[in-house]
Amino acid sequence: MSHPAFEPFARLKTPSLRRNLWVAILWAVALRPAVIQAGEIGEAQVIQLAQEQDLRTLEAIQSIALAEAEGVQAKLRPNPSIGWEREHFPALGSNGEGEDALTLRIPFDLSPRRTVRRHLAAAHVSIATAQAARTRSQAVVHAMTLFYQTLAEQHRVTLEQHALDQLRDAARVVTRRREAGAVSGYDQIRIEIEMELAASALRQTSDRAQRLHSELARSLGKGPDQVSFVGGLGPDARTETRTKADLGGDPRTHRPDRDPARASLRLQRDAQKQTRRASEAAARSWIPGFALSAGPRMARGDETRFGYVAGLAVNLPVFSRGQALRAQARAEQRVAQARADATQRTIAIERGRARSRLQSFRSEARHLDDAMLDRLDRLEKAAESGYREGARSIVELLDTRRLRTKVQTRRLELALSIKRAELALRAARGEFE
C-alpha cells in the first residue's frame, strides 16, 4: 500500500521507462523532418521565397542591369556624320560664285580604348553579380534564422505546456485531498504558485513564438494567417558529411576560391581578371584616333562644275595621351584584387568559425545527454520515493520536475544552436548564392 501522503501524486508518478519513452517521443516530434501540407512552409520553401521576395536582393539584381548597360555603352563605336557646307563669293553685276559640298565623315579609333572600357564594364558586371549573390545569401540566412527560431519557440511552447498540464493535474488532486483533510494547505498553495509561474512563462513564450511567426511570414511576402511553418531541428546529415570531408583535407592546400559552390568569390576573381586585361590593354591607349571625310562638291558660277572633297583629320596626343584611362584601369585592378583577397580570407575565417561552433555545440549536446539523463532519472525517482516515505517535501519534488523541464529546454537550445551553426557553415560554403 502506498503512503497516504503520496496518494495525491499517484497520477503524476510515471515509471522511468514510460518517462524516457515520453521524452523520446517529444524529441522525435521536435526534430522530425515534417511532411509539407497545403499552406505549410518548410525549409526548402523558406529558402526559395527568401531569394525571390527579399527587397534588398531585388535591388542588387537591378544593379546588375545598370552595370550591363555600361557594357553596352562601352561596345558602341562613334557614329559617322554627314554635313553640308556652302560657300558663296558675291560679285558686282552677277550672282557671284558659290560652292556646295556634301561630306561624309567616318571616325576611326585604332587604339584599345574600347577594349579597355569593355573589360572594365565586364568587371563591373561581375562585381554587381557577386554583390547580388552575397545579398541573396544574407537574405536566406536571415529568413532561415527566423525559421529555426520559430520552430524552437513552438517546441518550447510544447514543453512548457506539458509542464503546466502536470501542475494543473497535481493542483486538482491536491485540492480534493485537502478538502478531504488528507493534506495541509501548504502543498496546495505551493503548487498553485508554481502553476502561475509556469503559466506566465508559457504566455511569454507563446507571444514570442507568434511574433517570430508573423515577422517571418511578412519577410517572405505572406500573411501571418495564411501559412504555418513546419520542420525539424535535427542535425543535417549533408552538413556533417561535408564537415568531415573538410576536416579530412589539408587546410594548407584548401582553396575556397575553387569551391564550385562559392559563386561570389568566383565572380570577384573574374572581375580581377577583367581589370588586369583592361590594364594591359590601356598601355596602348596613347594611339591617336583619326577621321576620314569625303563627298561630292559642286561649284556654281559662269558654269557649273562638279568635283569632290576628301580629307583626313588626326587627333594630336598633346594634352591627353590616354593617361586617365590607364590610371583608372590600374586603380580598378588593385581594388578588384584587394576585394577578392579580402573575400577569400573572410570565407576561410567564416568557415573555420562555423565548423568550430558546430563541433562545440554537437559535443556539448552529446555531453549533456550522457551526463544528465541518467542522473535526472535517478534524482526524480529519489524525490518521488522520499516524498512517498515522508522524508522529502513537496518543494523538492516540484524542483525535480522543474529541473527536468529545464534540461529539456537546454537540449532544445543546443539543437537550435546546432542548426544556426549549420546554417552559418552552409552560407560560408556559398550554398545560398
Image (cartoon, helix red, strand yellow):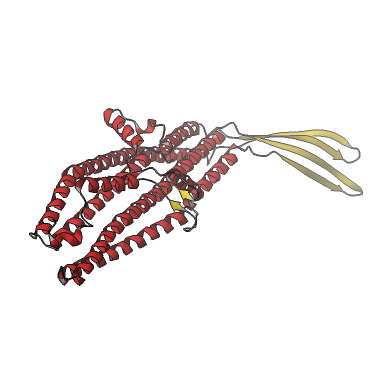
Tell whether 382 sits left or right of 109: left
- Please name the residue shown 29% across and 66% down the image: 200
Percent coordinates x, y for residue 187 in the rendering: 17, 67
Q: Nearer the viewer, residue 313 or 217?
A: 217
In the rendered image, the quadrant that contains the C terminus is: top left
Tell whether 288 sits left or right of 236: right
Q: Nearer the viewer, residue 125 or 15?
A: 15
State whether residue 311 is above or below residue 161. Answer: above
Percent coordinates x, y for residue 216 in the rendering: 43, 54
Tell whether 70 sits left or right of 94: left
Percent coordinates x, y for residue 255 in the rendering: 34, 31
Determine which quarter of the picture holds residue 163: bottom left
- Please name the residue shown 80% across and 35% down the image: 296
In the rendered image, the quadrant that contains the N terminus is: bottom left
- Please name the residue shown 26% across and 59% down the image: 166
Q: Which residue extends farthest front?
A: 1
- Please name the residue shown 87% across and 41% down the image: 300
